[in-house]
Image (tube, rainbow, N blue to C red):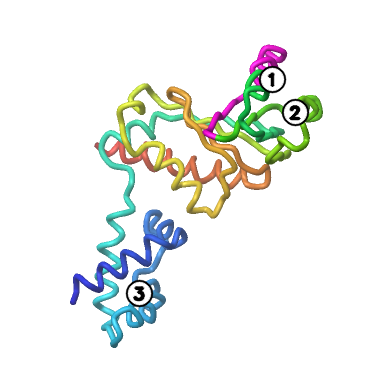
Amino acid sequence: MVNSISKIVQNIIDGDLSLQDALQRDYGNYSAIARMLKPKVEEFLGHDVKLESIITSVKRAKAGYKLLRGKITRVVAGSVINIRTDVAKISVEKTKRNLEKMRKTLADFPEEFFQVIEGISAITLIFDQKLFNEIYSIFREREILDKRQSLATIFIRSSDEIIDTPGCVLAFYNAVSRRHINMEETMSCFTDTIIVLGMEDVSKAFAALTDLITEARKQSDRT
């Protein structure tokens, strides 16, 4: 029975970013969380459950959200953050014509900030907002899938160890997601983890990532 309760509690927490954040950052009260989960657990099981059993399950679940372990801690601790504001993006259909125009555009603006994400059916260009009208006019209106302005880009630069250390990028993404921040685009480039988001969210995302890196450095100092 305890195992069933633990599994249900774990599944509920897995689907709730706020609870994950509360457990990982140690500001959640176990008893309060257990009382909140109690009706859902009882609904799943079809009978009453002792609050103490749920509290025990919440404590066990907490261990699953300590993402900073071993080599991940060292990589995150050594990472630094840079922010670029006033960024825009345009997504277009992936066609031979648009690929050629994209390559020509990159050549036309060699000194400007440009990121390109090439998918199976679309190409996304991320660039300085001051170029928006010029870039927008290059493509046919019917080929433009999405366009956005007033974005910001966060660059997280890590050591070469990140290439061979699974879980580091997930730690960065989770830190942002748990603050309920929408990531417009994400990508990796060698040792850089790049996150594109709205200007209104950049301060929250910066705080979340700074907290993560600070915690990793504290853990590194204790070892």
Q: Quadrant of the C terminus?
A: top left
Residue position marked by numbered label 2 in the rendering: 139
In the rendered view, does 43 fall on the left or right side of 172? Answer: left
- Mark closer to the chain start, 1 or 2: 1
Mark 1 element type: helix
At x 33%, y 82%, the residue is: 42
Mark 3 element type: helix
* Image mark count: 3
Identify whether 24 is placed above or below 154. below
Queried whether the magenta region covers residue 104, the answer comes back as yes
Q: Which mark is residue 101?
A: 1
Q: Which mark is residue 34?
A: 3
| Discs 1, 2 touching: Cβ within 8 Å | yes
Identify whether 97 is placed above or below 222. above
Are there few (<14), some (14-19), or many (20+) residues within 10 Å of tag 3?
many
Q: Residue 201 at x, y = what percent?
A: 63, 47
| Discs 3, 2 touching: Cβ within 8 Å | no
